[in-house]
Amino acid sequence: MSNSENRKPDLVCPRCRSLIEVLTNSPLECVWTIYSCTTCLYAWRSTEPGENTEPENYPEPLRLKAKNLTKFAVVPTIPTKLKFTGMQNLFQKGLIMVGPVAS
């Protein structure tokens, strides 16, 4: 059993330092646990290396500030609705019909 499996995780997210919750545990008792941040939605398994699970070892360039999360764009963006054109427009108006394909 690895060191990461034996220790309890910090009570904060490695990425944004907010509160975390347990998402699920392994079907076999004490094999792994999946944690998730309630703020930035980062999730990790207890068996991952320290740079993914420990706030003090999480890579500095990947860290987030919880207060800045509301400034981020929603990705992927929701596309604008396209207007029907050409054949789609004729089909929509019932001017053309699509039936079974003859074999």
Image (spheres, rainbow, N blue to C red):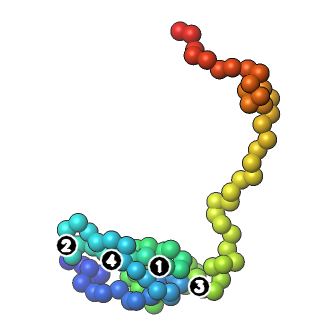
Q: Give the quadrant of residue 93.
A: top right
Residue type at tag 2? Glu
**Amino acid type for the residue under numbered disc 4:** Ser
User: Residue 94's x, y, as percent?
Assistant: 74, 24
Residue, x 60% and y 85% (percent of image)?
65
Which one is earlier in the sequence, the residue at label 4 or at label 1?
1
Q: How many marks?
A: 4
Q: Is residue 2 above or below residue 94?
A: below
Q: Nearer the viewer, mark 4 or mark 1?
A: 1
Q: Label 1: state its secondary structure.
A: strand
Looking at marks 1 and 2 on the same chain, the residue that comes earlier in the sequence is marked by 2
User: Which numbered disc covers residue 29?
Assistant: 2
Task: Please give the residue where the numbered disc 1 appears in the rendered image.
Answer: 37
Q: CA distance from mark 3 to mark 1?
A: 11 Å
Residue for badge 3: 66
Work out whether mark 2 precedes mark 3 in sequence or the reverse, and give the earlier one: 2
Distance between the alpha carbons at the discs numbered 4 and 1? 13 Å
81 left or right, relative to 8 = right
Residue 17 versus residue 46 in the image, above or below: below
Disc 1 crowd, CA 10 A, few/some/many (<14, 14-19, 20+): many
Give, as a three-letter code, the residue at label 3. Answer: Ala
From this view, report whether residue 95 is shown above or below residue 62: above
What residue does disc 4 label?
A: 46
Instruction: Please state the horizontal and vertical placement of residue 3, each as a whole percent of the image.
Output: 26, 83
